[in-house]
Image (tube, rainbow, N blue to C red):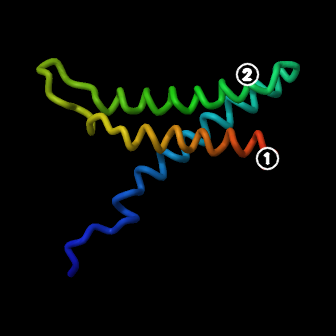
Amino acid sequence: MSAEPNIFVRHKDKAWHFLAGMAASFIVATVVNACFWELHDGYWTGLGLGAGAVVGLAKELWDARKDAKGRLVGTGWNWWDLAWTVAGSLFVIVGLRWGWA
C-alpha cells in the first residue's frame, strides 16, 4: 500500500471552495444585472467578484474561530482556500464578461 496521499482526496476541499466562489459570484452578478440592468457593467462585475471574496473570507473566519479558552475550534485559517474561492468567483466574472453564460 502506498503512503502517498491521493491528490483527489487531498484537494477535494479546494474544489468546493472554487465552486462556492463560482456560485456566490454568479448569483449576485446575475441578480444585480437582472434587477438593475441599466447600471454600468462594472457594477455587477465588481459586486459579483466581491460576493465571492466575502464568501471566502466568511468561511475562513469561521474556520479560524476559537472557543472561550482560546483553543482552535475550526480547521484554521488557510490562504489557499481563500485563493481558490476568489479564483472561482473570478472565473465566473470573466465568463460572464466574455459572454459564456
Side of 2 relative to 22 (left or right): left
Element on which disc 2 rests: helix
Q: Inspect the image, locate mark 1, and give the three-letter code of the amino acid beneath it.
A: Ala
Instruction: Find the distance from the CA under tag 1 to the CA under tag 2.
Output: 18 Å
Quick one: which residue is furthest to the right in this view? 38
Where residue 42 sits: x, y (%)?
Answer: 74, 25
Occupied quadrant, residue 34: top right
Occupied quadrant, residue 63: top left
Element on which disc 1 rests: loop
Residue located beneath label 1 in the image:
101
Q: Inspect the image, locate mark 2, and give the three-letter code of the amino acid beneath it.
A: Tyr
Towards the viewer: 40 or 31: 40
Quadrant assignment for the N terminus: bottom left
Q: Residue at x 30, y 34 (%)?
A: 77
Residue located beneath label 2 in the image:
43
Q: Residue at x 43, y 37 (%)?
A: 82
Q: Residue at x 75, y 32 (%)?
A: 30
